[in-house]
Amino acid sequence: MSPVISAILCLVIGYLLGSISVGVIYSKSLGRDIRTAGSKNSGATNMTRIHGMLPGLITFGGDCLKGVIAALIGRCSQALLCSSATAGPSSSASAAVKA
């Protein structure tokens, strides 16, 4: 995969991961939209205030997990690009020079 396509794919996946609101999804499953209560923020602090400690921790964990997934995707993408760059045409070019 070309570096440009890989970078665009990482940007799109990162954007989509960031658009997932764990607090809103989880609060709606609990029966109350978090954006209409407390500070009207969908973050872990407001979830803790409105729904309690466990929902707040689950929201915090879900938000952290989004960041970890995005970082792993970027790292895997970089590893694939680096491995393809070292095994690519440069190795055949150096073999041609030695011959």
Image: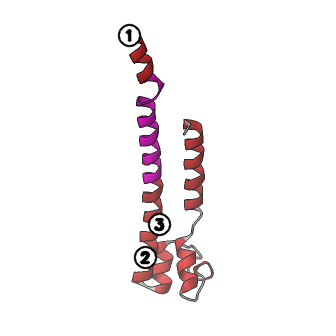
Residue beneath disc 2: 58
Q: Is mark 1 on a helix, strand or loop?
A: loop
Task: Name the front one of labels 3 and 1.
Answer: 1
Label 3 sits on a secondary structure element that is helix
- Label 2: how many residues lie within 10 Å, few (<14), some (14-19) or many (20+)? some
Residue 70 versus residue 22 in the image, above or below: above
Image quadrant holding the N terminus, namely top right
Q: In this view, does 78 lie above or below 39?
A: above
Q: Which residue type does callout 1 highlight?
A: Ala
> Percent x, y for residue 43?
51, 71
> What is the CA distance from the residue labelled 2 to the residue labelled 1?
61 Å
Q: Residues within 10 Å of mark 3 (few under 14, many from 20)?
A: some
Q: Tell me which numbered mark, 2 or 1, is placed earlier along the sequence.
A: 2
Q: Position of residue 94 (x, y in %)?
A: 40, 17
Q: Distance between the residues labelled 2 and 3?
A: 9 Å
Main SS class of the magenta portion in the image: helix
Q: How was the colour assigned to the protein in this rendering?
A: secondary structure
Q: Which of marks 3 and 1 is nearer the N terminus?
A: 3
Q: Position of residue 16 (x, y in %)?
A: 59, 59
Closest to the camera, between mark 2 and mark 1, is: 1
Q: State left or right for residue 54 relative to residue 2.
A: left
- The residue lying furthest to the front in this view is 99
Image: 71 above or below 38 = above
Please give the residue where the numbered disc 1 appears in the rendered image. 99
Q: Is residue 43 magenta?
A: no
Q: Quadrant of residue 61?
A: bottom left
Task: Name which residue lies at 55% across and 85% down.
Answer: 29
The local secondary structure at tag 2 comes to: helix
Asked if the residue at tag 3 contacts the one at tag 2, i.e. Cβ–Cβ closer than 8 Å, the answer is: no
Residue range of the region highlighted in magenta in the rendering: 71-90
The image quadrant of residue 39 is bottom right
Q: Which mark is residue 63?
A: 3
